[in-house]
Amino acid sequence: MTEIDAKALGADGAVRTASAFPPTPTTVARRPFRASPKLPLSLVGFAAFLLAWHLAVEVWRLPRFAKLPGLVEVFVEWTSTDPMYGVSLFTAEYYQHILVSLKRIVAAFSAATLLGVPLGLLLGWSQRFREYVFPVFETLRPVPILAWVPISIILFSGAETSVVFLTFIAAFFVTTLNTMTGVQSIDPSVVRAARCLGASPRQIFRHIVAPGALPHIFTGLQVSMGVSWFSLVAAEMVSGEFGLGYLINTAYAKIQYPTIAIGMITLGAVGYASSALVRLVGARLMAWRLREIGVGR
Amino acid sequence: MSAVAERRASDQTAAPRGRIDLHRVAKTYGQGRLAKTVMEDCSLTIEPGRLNVVIGPSGCGKSTLLRLIAGFDQPDAGAVTADGSPVRGPASDRLMVFQESALFDWMTVYENVAFALRAAGRGSRDIAPLAKDVLERVGLAAFKEKYPGQLSGGMQRRVELARALINDPAVMLLDEPFRGLDAMTRGLMQEYFLRLYADNPRTVVFVTTEIDEAILIADRLIILSNVPARVRWLVEIDLPRPRTVATLYEDDRANDIKREAIEVLHEEAMKSFRGAFRERASKEAVTAGSK
């Protein structure tokens, strides 16, 4: 997890820029958690969901639900030291799937951030650059990730690189577009003020444009993290030898239904954690904004 | 003596800086049928070291005047000169304080105020005493670590003033700096501004739409005509200082100026209405004739 943190931080130009005028190190770090839904309430939400699942599948055995893996069945399998289908909290295989998926996410997400943020900043900043690049960008962007599969397999020999590439592509477009929008959303009078105060174009880019775009950039990074997982699983289902997407797909083929549910729950948990991490980094870098909205207190 | 005041004192020996001349300036925005001539054959002088207040009917080109002086825009014809040399672009000795808040939300009050000096490559040790001094003068020393979003509207305007003042510009351009503040805060800010100005005299061009504000503040009052803008009426406001809203209320001279100014302004404002009516009337006549 800290790996993502470190890479996201070191990777993107905007982030380092903002730390040139560092936000005052107050107690900001803990605030995002307070900003997230209150724990007891979210527990009620989870309980209601699990209860509905349990009732629908195992108690009432509703018509379309009867074949689905039940809550108890899944829970027993997941926590078993000797699972029926070979994957549980106590097997090395389970963690290998998670680790492989995580590694791919880290690689793809950092590459997308590393390339997408600077490109987005440039697209927003320079009209001429935008005129050259944006039409191409906008033509490639709507191409669904699954349509990229053949090309990525031809392009890269071996499943590993092409899975990462597919994940990267999806995240890259989201990050770039949001960063560009972020630059364009900056109030022109703020830029004018900086110019008036004697800042050079370079200084304006560094101290005004990059930090000013940060809110949009981090919205983009959150979406991009979600999209990364989405396309990772799609890619792993198509070609892959490990990973949570692969696990779900093979479990389906082998009629190991509880394992499907284990894979899905794990995806949900890891996805939630990774998005929370992006939020956390964002909140640390944008202390000024948290306080402004008043979520901080 | 404050650090900034010291710097100024060393300049006092020279003639006051910041004389601005507009000579037969014209400015048109847009092209073809959408073109709008905002300024035509407009000549005026901003006297150095004085509080020049510009007032005029809304949309008459007051902001254009400031943009030309600031160097954001170039005139289509005529010349804008600052201390004799033509204005070619923005410079930090002609600083603009904007209508809408243009603070950098991601920087603290201190960083906002220090921005221009940092951009100029001055060291932190150099900047700190200046920033401290300026923040004290606008009464925000205790708020230097806050972000703009945490301040009230009036405080934000004061940060803007401080951010401009720290550069000790020869000319300060203020585009309706107190617009959008509630009446009470506005009144306080006006008196506040006057006290600040008394300690830091320089050339000021202050644009407003409020006649009371104009008379309270001005050394010279410049009333612009309806578009295209020209100087319609220029009056020296020779009322004694310090002035307050209360003293002006009972001052006959102030009331005379106000009455006359309102008459002129009203006349100019009506021109744009009448112009609109005439245009509509002539259009209707045309359509009626074609039937």
Image (spheres, coloured by chain):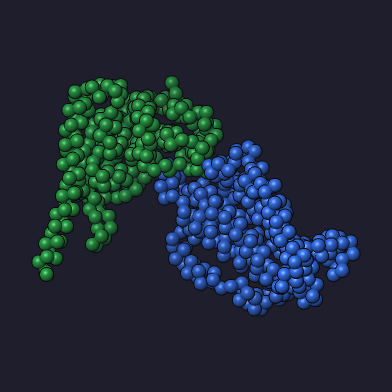
Chain colours: A blue, B green
> Of residues B259 and A81, which is closer to you in this image?
A81
Residue drawn at (29%, 38%) of the image = B208
- Quadrant, the N terminus of chain B: top left
Q: Is residue A59 left or right of residue A125?
A: right
Q: Quadrant of residue B34?
A: bottom left
Q: Residue furthest front?
A: A60
x then y, percent, for residue A141: 54, 69
Vertical placement of residue A91 versus B131, above or below: below
Q: Quadrant of residue A247?
A: bottom right
Vertical placement of residue B244 versus B18, above or below: above
> Of residues B263 and B128, which is closer to you in this image?
B263
x then y, percent, for residue B200: 37, 27
Q: Decide if residue A160 is in sight here.
A: no
Q: Residue furthest right?
A: A82
Q: Quadrant of residue A73?
A: bottom right
Vertical placement of residue B41 versus B264, above or below: below
Q: Decide if residue A275 is in sight here.
A: yes
Residue drawn at (16%, 33%) of the image = B260
x then y, percent, for residue B137: 44, 26
- Quadrant, the C terminus of chain B: bottom left
Q: Residue furthest left?
A: B289
> Of residues B203 and B106, which is closer to you in this image?
B106
